[in-house]
Amino acid sequence: MESTVLSELATEVAIPICAVIGIIFSLVQWFLVSRVKLTPERNPPSSGPNSNKNGYSDYLIEEEEGLNDHNVVVKCAEIQSAISEGATSFLFTEYQYVGVFMVAFAILIFLFLGSVEGFSTKSRPCTYDELKTCKPALATAVFSTVSFLLGAITSVLSGYLGMKVATYANARTTLEARKGVGKAFITAFRSGAVMGFLLAANGLLVLYIAINLFKLYYGDDWEGLFEAITGYGLGGSSMALFGRVGGGIYTKAADVGADLVGKVERNIPEDDPRNPAVIADNVGDNVGDIAGMGSDLFGSYAESSCAALVVASISSFGINHDFTAMSYPLLISSMGILVCLITTLFATDFSEIKAVKEIEPALKKQLIISTVLMTIGIAIVSWIALPSSFTIFNFGTQKVVKNWQLFLCVGVGLWAGLIIGFVTEYYTSNAYSPVQDVADSCRTGAATNVIFGLALGYKSVIIPIFAIAVSIFVSFSFAAMYGIAVAALGMLSTIATGLAIDAYGPISDNAGGIAEMAGMSHRIRERTDALDAAGNTTAAIGKGFAIGSAALVSLALFGAFVSRAAISTVDVLTPKVFIGLIVGAMLPYWFSAMTMKSVGSAALKMVEEVRRQFNTIPGLMEGHTKPDYATCVKISTDASIKEMIPPGALVMLTPLIVGTFFGVETLSGVLAGSLVSGVQIAISASNTGGAWDNAKKYIEAGASEHARTLGPKGSEPHKAAVIGDTIGDPLKDTSGPSLNILIKLMAVESLVFAPFFATHGGLLFKIF
């Protein structure tokens, strides 16, 4: 086989350098955000030719209305501190429980995989080539356990660091909003970029280091090496599941409680400091949308990389020990970091936002610029890192593939991601007719609002599914399951920009809450509301990316599982497969029911507590007394920790039970069924919730003549919109986003345990 343009040494150097560049860039962004001070200052930074760039030489405590109030700055700092403490305390509590699970599951991986050959330390014939000898099954057990723990720890760190950055930035965004919407936008976006680049670079660096360390033991046994590496994806996604579900229950319990009593019953603003649930609500934005989303996308990235590496290890790349071609998925991610770095500069340095209406277009430009630049980047990587012709493993045969075909596989995934992003934006942004129609339906009450919102969600599934279907067809036709794995990687290649845009939303939301609680002027609140409305749409786009990539990732993992479990065909007409198919299709409904009920029961406790405080604390409604925020924070924490365990257990135990008792054919049916139904429910739930939220904001903002006929706040249409938003909260922030982890996690878990299922699985069918 011909050699690649990029040498092995150059590959060894390029990947860690790109990861380190990403980490350095994120630290630079963090430093720039930290220059916005949270203490009242009279002396601005020293003036120089560039001192006015991004507003650093402005007085921080001067509002445009001429106020010069030190108390506002102090109050913002106090509120930020309360939010940060609440978020940190919740994550530490959550991670204690998750840590116990992590250790228990690591032991389970070791015992299951070690027992494949009775804990033998002798070398064995390779799975795909019995003439060669591979490392013992015990080695796979040990290294899979280590990579599982590595993935889990990286995922937990990703979520935690993202949350710390977001809570660090929200009050700073509020203070910058007094100088103009552009300054606030830059602070919020930079903070999101810190998280995006840290996560993308850390994920790549840890995976790269793990591969090189494992290679010291495995040597030429690349099949065993990359089979063991799949534990990295499993670790990442299992932590993401608990982060997403726990964080989602936390944030929505507080949000629903705050909305129902505050807005509907007491007719006070969303983030009014008199509302006892308001701090818990702001904490929830960070633990659910930031920490949960960070872990989720890290899991997708880790799994798509692992799926591609597993398939490549038994193709010509692995057979010929071509390290550069083998590292193609990692080189794509490395190029993605460089592309996203350039893209970020377009938002923060090359242009400046001067008006509210420029916010959403600026965020959309980020998606377009990163996609266009990444297409060129993929072409370069495909040219230098791949031989012109090679073979890819395809269910027992080797399929000949050209390098330009693999470029098209990655490219089609990348552009499908952009299409899903824009369709999501169309259905969830209040700038377009679908959300405006939902807002209009509030004239006749909450019932019609709910009907219109559900219809919008179901309809919004159509184009994303076609985009995913085209991606699957093109990538599978060109490069079998490897093509699908790299298409998923293409969709996630601009993960740093995607996460920056996604994290920007909750940071802006919190900034608005802090402005309200600190008693800042209506004009400042309008600016933070505009940032938040754009952030709502971008959060929906981020969820669209996560769900689309999850579909491709789980299909690629499914293909790797079928190959590893030695299933020649998955025949739907076989009873064993068909029962798996219908049970698998039911699982997302069961999971959604559990998570939504959890939000409902936690919200019930929150509503009762908020009502109790309003009714029993004298002077609370008049603003003379402070509410008891701590009790509400405790209710959310306790409920989310307790309620995240059953849905998590459902997802983690299903593949183990089905594979052990019913065998690999039934498990393949379960995976296919959960993928097909899970993607549809996830997209419709996320978009329905996003549309209801922005319909409410459309009425509240009153920016158009049509919106003003529905408002103002407190009117009957507005109350109907609040009820719709409250129903949509668990859909868009708990059930919907968690479902994409369900379909990925079951697939990667099945792949990790495939050797055990293939050897000892199907106990019931063996007995009868």
Image (cartoon, grey):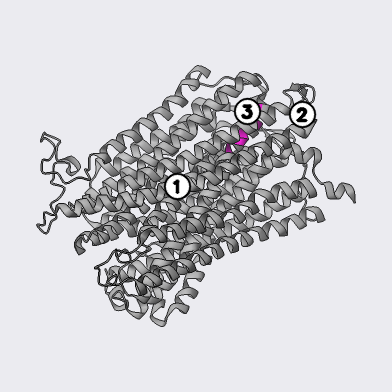
In this rendering, the label closer to the viewer, 3 or 2: 2
Is 757 positioned to the left or the right of 673 in the image?
A: right
- Regarding residue 266, the answer to whether it shows in the image is yes
Q: What residue would you read off at disc 2? A: 119
Q: Tag 2: Cα neighbours inside 10 Å, few (<14), some, or many (≥20)?
A: some
Of the two numbered discs 1 and 3 in the rendering, the one whose residue sits closer to the viewer = 1
- Identified at 50% across, 28% down, the residue is 383
- Amino acid at pointer 2: Phe
Check disc 1: other Cα within 10 Å, few if <14, some if 14-19, many if 20+: many
Q: In the depicted view, which residue is nearer to us: 654 or 208?
A: 654
- Whichever of labels 3 and 2 marks the residue nearer the N terminus, that label is 2
Range of residues picked out in magenta: 225-233
Answer whether residue 466 is visible to the viewer in this image. no
Q: Position of residue 137 (x, y in %)?
A: 74, 28
Asked if labels 2 and 1 touch by Cβ distance under 8 angstroms, the answer is: no
- Kindly state the secondary structure of the residue where label 3 is placed: strand
Q: How many marks?
A: 3
First reached walking from the N terminus: tag 1 or tag 3: 1
Sequence-earlier tag: 1 or 2: 2
Position of 11 relative to 412 (above/below): above
Q: Position of residue 20 (x, y in %)?
A: 40, 28
How far, Cα to Cα, is label 1 from label 3? 40 Å
* 578 left or right of 517 in image: right
Q: Whole-percent x and y of residue 194? A: 36, 40
Residue 125: percent from left, percent from top = 78, 25
Q: What type is the residue that disc 1 sits on? A: Ala
Mark identifier at residue 291: 1
Q: 411 or 566: nearer the eye?
A: 566
- What residue would you read off at disc 3? 390
Instruction: State whether the magenta stretch is mostly helix, strand or loop.
Output: helix
**Cβ atoms at labels 3 and 2 below 8 Å apart:** no
**Tag 2's secondary structure?**
loop
